[in-house]
C-alpha cells in the first residue's frame, strides 16, 4: 500500500465515508502532500464510493485544491482591484525576481510556488499575501521579501 493510500484511508477514517467528507479529505491530502495527485483522487473516489469524475470535478473547481505539484511554501498574492491599487503588481514582480519564477511556477528546489488569488478577504488591509495558511496584510515590497526570506531559512 502506498503512502498516499494510507493517508487517504486515515483521512476517511477520521472524516467519515459520506459525500460530505469529500472536502475535508481533499484538504487533508493537500495539507500533507501539497497537491492532489491522480492516485490520490482515485483513492478518494474508491474510499468514498464516488465517481472519479465527481472527485476530480470538486478538486478542480476550488482554487486552493491544487491538482498539480506545488512547492512546500505556496505564496498567493491577492489580485483584487483594491490590492492592485495598493501595489500588488510591484510585490508580485519583486517576489518573482527574488524567487526567480513567474506566477504559476515553482522554484527548482520545490520550496516555493508563486500564485495569485481572486480574493483573500482582507481588502481593508491590502495588499495581502498568503503563505501556506499564514496571512500577511499591509504589505510593502520590502515586507514581502523579508517574509519570503524567513520561509527560505526554514530547513524543515
Image: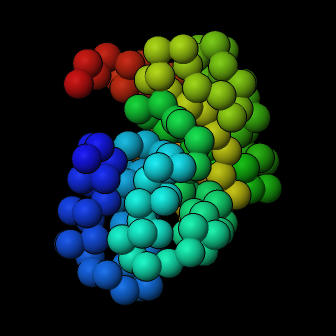
60 to 12, vertically: above or below:
above
| Residue at screen point 25% across, 63% down | 9
Give residue 83's position: percent from left, percent from top: 70, 50
Q: Can residue 91 be seen in this view?
A: no
Color style of the picture: rainbow
| Residue at screen point 67% across, 45% down | 116
154 to 61, vertically: above or below:
above
Q: Is residue 65 left or right of residue 87?
A: left
68 to 94, vertically: above or below:
below
| Residue at screen point 29% across, 43% down | 2
Q: In this view, does 73 lie to the left or right of 76?
A: left
Q: Which of 100 and 149 is in front in this view?
A: 100
Q: Is residue 89 left or right of residue 65?
A: right
Q: Which residue lies furthest to the front in this view?
A: 1
Q: Nearer the viewer, residue 107 or 67?
A: 67
Give the quarter of the figure containing the C terminus. Answer: top left
Q: Is residue 60 visible?
A: yes
Q: In which quarter of the image is residue 15?
A: bottom left
Query: Number of labelled discs?
Result: 0
Q: In this view, does 88 lie to the left or right of 129?
A: right
| Residue at screen point 72% across, 50% down | 79
Give residue 126's position: percent from left, percent from top: 61, 51
Give residue 34's position: percent from left, percent from top: 43, 43
57 to 38, vertically: above or below:
below
Give residue 145's position: percent from left, percent from top: 51, 22
Amino acid at each position: 500500500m502506498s503512502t498516499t493510500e494510507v493517508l487517504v484511508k486515515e483521512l476517511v477514517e477520521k472524516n467519515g465515508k459520506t459525500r460530505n467528507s469529500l472536502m475535508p479529505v481533499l484538504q487533508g491530502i493537500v495539507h500533507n502532500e501539497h497537491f492532489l495527485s491522480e492516485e490520490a483522487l482515485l483513492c478518494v473516489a474508491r474510499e468514498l464510493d464516488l465517481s472519479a469524475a465527481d472527485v476530480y470535478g470538486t478538486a478542480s473547481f476550488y482554487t486552493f485544491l491544487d491538482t498539480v505539484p506545488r512547492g512546500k511554501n505556496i505564496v498567493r498574492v491577492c489580485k483584487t482591484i483594491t490590492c492592485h491599487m495598493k501595489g500588488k503588481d510591484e510585490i508580485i514582480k519583486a517576489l518573482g525576481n527574488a524567487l526567480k519564477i513567474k506566477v504559476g511556477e515553482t522554484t527548482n528546489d520545490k520550496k516555493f510556488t508563486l500564485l495569485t488569488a481572486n480574493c483573500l478577504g482582507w481588502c481593508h488591509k491590502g495588499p495581502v499575501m498568503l503563505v501556506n495558511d499564514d496571512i500577511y496584510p499591509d504589505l510593502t515590497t520590502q515586507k514581502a521579501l523579508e517574509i519570503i526570506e524567513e520561509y527560505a531559512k526554514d530547513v524543515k
